[in-house]
Amino acid sequence: MTKYVINGANELNGEIEISGAKNAAVAIIPAALMVDGVCRIENLPDISDVKTLLNILKEMGARIKSVNKRTIDIDCSRVGTSHATFDMMRRIRASYYLIGALLSRFGRADVAMPGGCNFGGVRPIDQHIKGFTAMGANVHVRNGIVTAVTDEALSGTTIYLDVVSVGATINLMLGATLAKGMTVIENAAREPHIVDLANFLNSMGADVRGAGTSEIKVRGVRRLGGGFYSIIPDQIEAGTYMAAVAATGGRVIIKDIIPKHLDCISVKLREMGVTVVDLGDAIMVERKGPLTRTHVKTMPYPGFPTDMQPQISTVLCLADGTSIVTDSVWEDRFKYVDELAKMGSSIRVDGRTALIEGIPYFTGAPIKATDLRAGAALVIAGLAAKGRTVIENVHYIERGYEKMISKLNSLGADIKVAHYGREDSIFRRRIG
């Protein structure tokens, strides 16, 4: 068991590099199943979700070769099964992307219901099923297993998503890539990682148009060949470090990013009194004075991302006055509020909305991460807190952040990793 021990109240200063986007990587890796040949993927983040997906592909027969720390070659030409390892698939949410990839390649998919973070509310796959059914597949869910079968190849059609769903948009893009004819996905999600997936597929020989708009058209092709592709920088990782600087104060240059992807976050931080400067392929974030209250409502891209809601809410706990945060994407995504209360926060939650009364400072306390982004928010709280904060359940954080502790320590944070052995012995090591 591992914990993070944070001695807080240190400003963050310096430079930090952003890793490849988690949400793009977990869509592109399953897409490699459809490639007839070797595809080289660069800028992969070194996180547990990526490792789990690669292990799933290995067990299915893929040959995976590490070129360097962030680059791998994947050859799925010898994969001959539509069954994935159920135990590993239950560990991550993105496992459901295997449905679209396997259906597209084999006409059949047997996939365990996805796992990953449970941050409250319902995360259904009804829009995925609706789309695959419209394309000619028979889909049923029994005993936690999704089975999708089509007698022939999937057939192109027009699919209107009842809600803007990132997961369904990606899954149906995968299913449509090798389908017969044209598939049109209406009311599609527009997130940067959807554009990145489309660019990956097109670089392998697919015909995907309109990614980044509300209507995506996919003309099915007979096969995908090999090629090279580099994953975009992680929008949410960059936003998390922006929020950390806002909470602690200091000045940090965040490098290897696409500033346009961060506009929705930068706008809110500026409203709070934080300086944010676009440097081209980097961004400078600085906070000297007090934070000002503001209101935040999460929306599908290009709106404020739900994956940044816990982080911005944590920063707003330290702002003067009363702020309101509404999550219109997921219901009940405020499970972390009870943990922040242990550190002195004043937050009242009513359904999808949190009313946040600003406090002078957090006080260090023992707390537990409840999911990936909530865990990142608790790290931010610990960095800003007076005293020592100990965070448990950090495996959630490591699902989506590459070397978070070493990166923060390089900026002046004081975080140690505590390892507990079988006999509850403990030793600590400084990271970075």
Image (cartoon, helix red, strand yellow):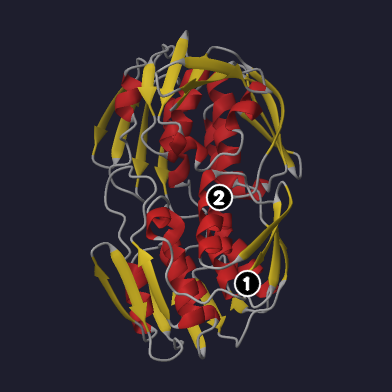
Which comes before the other along the chain, label 2 or label 1?
Answer: 2
Q: How far apart are marks 2 and 1 (CA)?
A: 21 Å
Measured as percent of width and height from the top left, residue 66 is found at: 70, 54
Left or right of residue 268: residue 277: right
User: In this picture, is 26 found above or below 161?
Assistant: above
Q: Can you see residue 213? A: yes
Label 1 sits on a secondary structure element that is: helix
Label number found at residue 201: 1
Quadrant in which residue 103 is drawn: bottom left
> In front of the other: label 2 or label 1?
2
Q: Residue 45 appears at what percent x and percent y? A: 62, 47
Q: Residue 289 location in percent, x, y? A: 58, 16
Q: Is residue 172 visible?
A: no
In screen coordinates, is 376 left or right of 47? left
Q: Nearer the viewer, residue 252 or 404?
A: 404
Three-letter code for the amino acid on which mark 1 is drawn: Leu
Closest to the observer, 118 or 90: 90
